[in-house]
């Protein structure tokens, strides 16, 4: 009989699977009411970097009645060993097969991880389709941004949690534990779970389709509510923060302590799903942030602390916070990092502070090449602001700048693409002029991805540009962004097409997803693993066309996610889409008088929480 120890000897990075990291929690199985496997559908190095999973892991384990263990997608070599030996996929902490847990909770962070979910369930011996699972099988739960349109996954999952999970997960577990102790069937248990705010149980909703695949009707089956509204924490300062954090064995993508300065965003960029679904903004008090980081750094020895958020420099007490953190951590040699610096909140002092005085590259995201198109997407930056920021960065000693853009944004034409080229050349010229004899060291990289319209954004009705058109626009840029000091990088357009299909997908896509996995698709977000040919085959054999999903939608069409609410009024999203068409901007809702009545605050009975307006 093969053993886990034996197969660990044969895989490339066994430390991915052994658990036992500093602050990992191992509880006796027989002494808890419920056991949860928190599953991330990508490898250890990526999944470990996900703050949400680390937070829920400690949250559940802090409760005496439950235990949480982790599992990440096994790399290909490990998968091969598991299949060869017939051993099921197991948890890191106690090596229990996943099918022995009461709950397997998957993080739905990006659509191109969905085939990995099916692969992990299969490796664990869990029947993929919900209707094929029995009473003894675990409840399969999904959470994360993908829950705001999980329709392609509904055949495989029992329920999804919309919104923030810190409190909701304990309510779900309490309800499940009670149901288990009362020997309720799974069906009865799910009826109870329906009562929890933010819980979406897809089998309680019926979807009917028209001939050509549009949705004819979407309605709840009693006792499900017509619309499931997201969960939200009204106050981040008093919200749960763990006492401990894990320290990895294998270096993760983000090897550092992390804390969220705030959730939500006030900017209103029309393409940004995160900016819409996590509204309103809620800032955490500086004292809480400092206490937390002091505790975590002391116990873990991390040498970097990342202050995360959608637009971290918008934190209203950023300078005070930085001073306090620098005083505290500089003597210990702990660097601070800020994952996203907006062009209009950049200052060389701020950036230098975050990079610990090192002048490594800087990344800015103008998103679009012309002021006109930036007004369309409500990313209200002028060319002058971008060039001024570039000048300040070069003058302060940076020599490598990366400019991030999207192509295929609504109303984009070739002059907008030309604008990307012009902007990049102007930035390069500024860098060269300021660097004198060292001009040759200046590098400007234009990084381009394809715009994917996302649910719950003003652009949810917009078409996604075709593969051929994406390639044409990429070629347009590639031909022009040549010359010393200019670099061009781009995302594989086929991955963007697939992401677009899944992100606005419906329940019919579940068959294609299962077929793609059967044919051998996994790790679709990895360009070297992605199999466009197999996805095309999967779509064809299940009678679906990619264009059905990337097409424009009419305002009155029923959307697959119409019964799931982030709190945004449809009328607001439509009006934002129309304002985009007319090139009209909408102000940042940080000043109270600028509230654009998106619907979130009123419908969720919540207020933006700003430390200073
Ligand atoms: S309701 Fe107003 S303040 Fe609240 S998130 Fe929407 S726009 Fe911002």
Image (tube, rainbow, N blue to C red):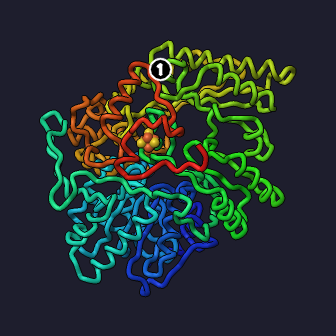
84 lies left or right of 324? left
| Percent coordinates x, y for residue 227 in the rendering | 25, 51
Residue 2 is at least partly visible in this image: no
For the point 71% across and 36% down, which residue is it? 361
Which is nearer the eye, 491 or 280? Answer: 280
| Percent coordinates x, y for residue 24 in the rendering | 58, 73
Image-quarter location of ligand 1: top left
The C terminus - image quarter: top right
557 lies left or right of 411? left
| Percent coordinates x, y for residue 390 in the rendering | 71, 26
Residue neighbourhood size for the residue with mark 1, other residues' Cα within 10 Å, grouped as few (<14), some (14–19), many (≥20): some
Quarter of the image for residue 284 reads: bottom right
The N terminus - image quarter: bottom left
Compared with 97, 196 (above or below) is above
> Is label 1's Cβ within 8 Å of ligand 1?
no
5 lies left or right of 364? left
Residue farthest left in this picture: 211
Find disc 1 in the rendering and name its residue: 473
For the point 53% across and 40% down, which residue is it? 590
Which is nearer the eye, 380 or 452? Answer: 380
For the point 46% across and 29% down, which residue is it? 586
């Amino acid at each position: 009989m093969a053993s886990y120890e034996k197969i660990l000897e044969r895989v490339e990075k066994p430390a991915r699977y052994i658990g036992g990291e500093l602050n990992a929690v191992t509880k006796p199985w027989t002494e808890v009411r419920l056991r949860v496997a928190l599953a991330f559908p990508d490898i250890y190095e990526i999944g470990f970097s996900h703050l949400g999973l680390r937070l829920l892991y400690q949250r559940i384990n802090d409760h005496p009645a439950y235990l949480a263990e982790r599992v990440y997608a096994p790399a290909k070599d490990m998968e091969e060993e598991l299949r060869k030996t017939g051993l099921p996929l197991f948890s890191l902490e106690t090596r229990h097969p996943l099918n022995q847990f009461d709950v397997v909770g998957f993080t739905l962070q990006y659509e191109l991880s969905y085939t990995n979910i099916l692969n992990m369930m299969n490796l664990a011996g869990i029947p993929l389709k919900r209707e094929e699972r029995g009473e003894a099988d675990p409840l399969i739960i999904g959470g994360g941004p993908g829950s705001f349109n999980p329709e392609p996954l509904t055949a495989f999952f029992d329920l999804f949690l919309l919104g923030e999970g810190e409190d909701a997960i304990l309510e779900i577990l309490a309800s499940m534990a009670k149901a288990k102790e009362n020997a309720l069937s799974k069906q009865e248990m799910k009826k109870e779970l329906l009562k929890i705010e933010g819980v979406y149980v897809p089998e309680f909703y019926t979807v009917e389709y028209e001939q050509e695949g549009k949705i004819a009707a979407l309605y709840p089956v009693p006792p499900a509510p017509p619309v499931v509204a997201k969960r939200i924490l009204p106050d981040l300062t008093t919200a749960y923060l763990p006492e401990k954090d894990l320290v990895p064995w294998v270096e993760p993508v983000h090897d550092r302590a992390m804390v969220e300065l705030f959730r939500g965003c006030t900017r209103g960029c029309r393409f940004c799903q995160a900016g819409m679904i996590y509204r309103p903004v809620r800032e955490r008090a500086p004292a809480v942030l400092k206490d937390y980081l002091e505790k975590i750094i002391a116990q873990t020895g991390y040498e970097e602390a990342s202050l995360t958020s959608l637009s971290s420099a918008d934190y209203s007490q950023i300078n005070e916070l930085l001073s306090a953190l620098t005083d505290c951590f500089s003597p210990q040699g702990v660097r601070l990092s800020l994952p996203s610096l907006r062009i209009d909140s950049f200052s060389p002092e701020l950036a230098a502070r975050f990079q610990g005085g090192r002048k490594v590259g800087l990344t800015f995201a103008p998103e679009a090449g012309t002021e006109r198109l930036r007004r369309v997407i409500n990313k209200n930056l002028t060319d002058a602001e971008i060039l001024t920021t570039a000048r300040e960065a070069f003058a302060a000693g940076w020599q490598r700048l990366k400019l991030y853009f999207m192509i295929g944004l609504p109303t984009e034409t070739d002059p907008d693409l030309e604008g990307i080229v012009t902007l990049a050349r102007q930035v390069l010229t500024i860098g060269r002029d300021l660097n004198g004899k060292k001009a040759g060291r200046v590098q400007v990289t234009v990084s381009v991805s394809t715009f994917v319209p996302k649910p719950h954004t003003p652009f949810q009705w917009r078409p996604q540009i075709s593969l051929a058109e994406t390639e044409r626009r990429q070629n347009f840029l590639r031909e022009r962004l040549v010359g010393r000091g200019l670099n061009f990088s781009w995302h594989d357009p086929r991955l963007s097409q697939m992401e677009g299909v899944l992100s606005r997908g419906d329940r019919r896509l579940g068959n294609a997803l299962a077929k793609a996995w059967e044919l051998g698709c996994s790790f679709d977000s990895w360009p070297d693993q992605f199999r466009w040919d197999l996805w095309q085959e999967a779509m064809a054999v299940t009678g679906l066309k990619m264009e059905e999903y990337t097409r424009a939608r009419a305002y009155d069409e029923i959307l697959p996610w119409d019964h799931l609410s982030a709190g945004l009024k449809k009328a607001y999203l439509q009006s934002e889409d129309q304002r985009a068409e007319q090139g009209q901007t909408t102000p940042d809702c940080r000043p109270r008088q600028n509230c654009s009545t998106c619907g979130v605050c009123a419908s969720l009975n919540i207020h933006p929480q700003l430390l200073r307006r």
